[in-house]
Image (cartoon, helix red, strand yellow):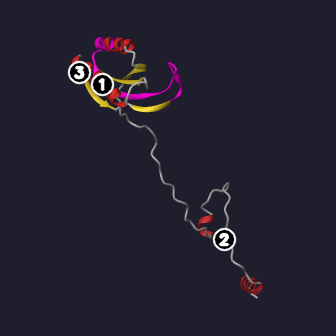
Amino acid sequence: MKTYELTYIISPEITSEEAESFSREIEDYISKKEGSILNRSIPVAKTLTYPIKKHMSGFIGTLEFKLEAEHLLQLKETLNKDGKINRHMIIIKNPVKIGKIRGRKNKIIEPAKEVLTEGNIQEKNAHQETIIPSKKVELKDIEQKLDEILGE
């Protein structure tokens, strides 16, 4: 048995109690044909977007059921012959398959925390651009360092 969903619009010329009894008649018909009702909604009065059979409103209801295909044709014929239904639609509901979601693993990339020093600057490749953090140097310190190096 396949799962089907029936959506129907009942004429607004009847009352809401009559619309509910009509939906129960459809459910009884399905159960007589050895079908099973999975989910149902009570017909609710709604305004339509465009006129259907010269009516701008109607009772809209849905019914989810399981039924054999040969009995489905008989159900369609009875719905077509009934004058209370303005429009109906039966669709096949395929079961939802839960599959594997393929994708790459998201790797968390942490920002670099490396501090550049004179020792590890030489380890870097020659084609990579490096920035050396600089300290403010006084002129006196430079002269003193030069004197130490030159040995004066």
Distance (Cα) linking label 3 and label 1: 9 Å
Q: Main secondary structure of the magenta part?
A: strand
State which region is magenta.
Answer: 48-73
Q: Position of 66 compared to 60: left or right?
A: left
State if disc 2 and disc 3 touch (CB < 8 Å). no
Among the 4 quarters of the image, the one containing residue 12? top left
Q: Please name the residue that numbered disc 3 is placed on.
A: 31
Instruction: Say which mark, if any, is on residue 26.
Output: none
Distance (Cα) linking label 1 and label 2: 74 Å
Against 75, is 97 above or below?
Answer: below
Q: Quadrant of the N terminus?
A: top left
Place of residue 31 in the rendered image (x, y in percent of width and height, measured from the top left):
23, 21
Q: Nearer the viewer, mark 3 or mark 2?
A: 3
Residue at 53% over, 23% down: 51
Place of residue 25 in the rendered image (x, y in percent of width and height, measured from the top left):
28, 22
Residue type (three-letter) at the residue carrying disc 2 = Pro
Q: Please name the residue that numbered disc 2 is placed on.
A: 133
Q: Position of 116 compared to 68: left or right?
A: right
Of 4 and 101, nearer the camera is 4
